[in-house]
Image: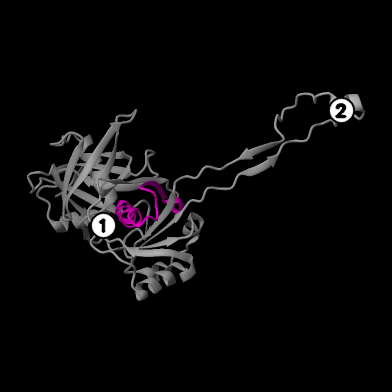
Amino acid sequence: MPQRQFRQVDVFTSTPYLGNALAVVLDADGLDEEAMLRFANWTNLAETTFVLPPTDPSADYRVRIFTTTTELPFAGHPTLGTAHAWLEAGGRPRRPGVVIQECAAGLIEVHTGDRDGQGRHQLAFLSPPLRRTGPLEDDVLEWALAGLGLRAADVVAHQWVANGPQWAVLMLHDAEAVLAVEPDFVALEGLEIGIIGPHLVPAVEAVPAARRDGERPKGTRAELEPLLPADDSAAFETAVRPIPADFEVRAFCPGEGMPEDPVTGSLNAGIAQWMIPAGLVAPSYTVRQGTRLGRAGHVGLSEHDGGIRVSGDVVTCIEGTVCWD
């Protein structure tokens, strides 16, 4: 029975099992579309990728990306995860420091950063152009609001950011509002919807120090004496809770095997392509995603040479071979 190299990797995390899992078949030449889709459905992950020889002479490899039900022209976490698996398996890019991935959306640049202490590269892909932009139509906005249990007043801004997947996005007032959403997946079926809100810097909390055991003795002379040293050296202590990232994001894609995606490269890329030029965010910012699912995904977004670079860590969790008859 033929065996093919296989990796299962975790994307947008440096800690295994806290990001978004991806299955990668590294030598998929000879597999037809039916076999690929059957295997992707069997893995039951958000996406599965198949690495093939490139048809474009400038590409290092070609990839096909499948959900459990369909093929995608482009997706973000499969782009980083496939590049990581290909490099780990011995792939060598034509251009040092840049992997050129061929997919149905065209050629995607994946930049390799410096290696960490465990020999891993941090990777970043240059986002492809948006295929659909502009505010959501009234009926789509009403659909999204009803399915997410929100009111129009809860939304700061909204936009199409389709770059392969047909993402629609709502920007909410803050991260707490994002985390509080309880979606109705039946009502949302057929809509790929993302929500984003800023993590607000918490107010400085003044905490009174513990009272001194004794009181200053009475009398003119005694009142001029300094107090004895105490464990609490200040009258007040301050406690500021650091924010986990600049923004919180959630992605809902009912109808797929996983109705809420743990960490989503394509959605975050599209959001940055909308919000950075619009002046809604700084040219460089970070996102946390997957919190409600018990994950801890971390995505970096930055403007780069007129485009958007999406960066994150990838770790390998499973390595071996898969069999086909």
Report which quarter residue 135 is drawn in: bottom left
Where disc 2 sits, the SS reads: helix
State the residue in front, 264 or 46.
264
Mark 2 — residue? 223
Residue 6 position in % (x across, y down): 22, 42
The residue at the point 58 percent across, 42 percent down is: 240
Report which quarter residue 93 is drawn in: top left
State the residue in front, 88 or 303.
303
At label 1, the amino acid type is: Thr
Residue 279 position in % (x across, y down): 37, 55
Mark 1 — residue? 67
Q: State the CA–CA distance, disc 1 to disc 2.
A: 76 Å
The residue at the point 48 percent across, 51 percent down is: 199
Asked whether the viewer can see residue 271, the reply is yes
Queried whether the magenta region covers residue 192, the answer comes back as: no
Q: What is the quadrant of the N terminus in the image?
A: top left
The residue at the point 32 percent across, 44 percent down is: 11
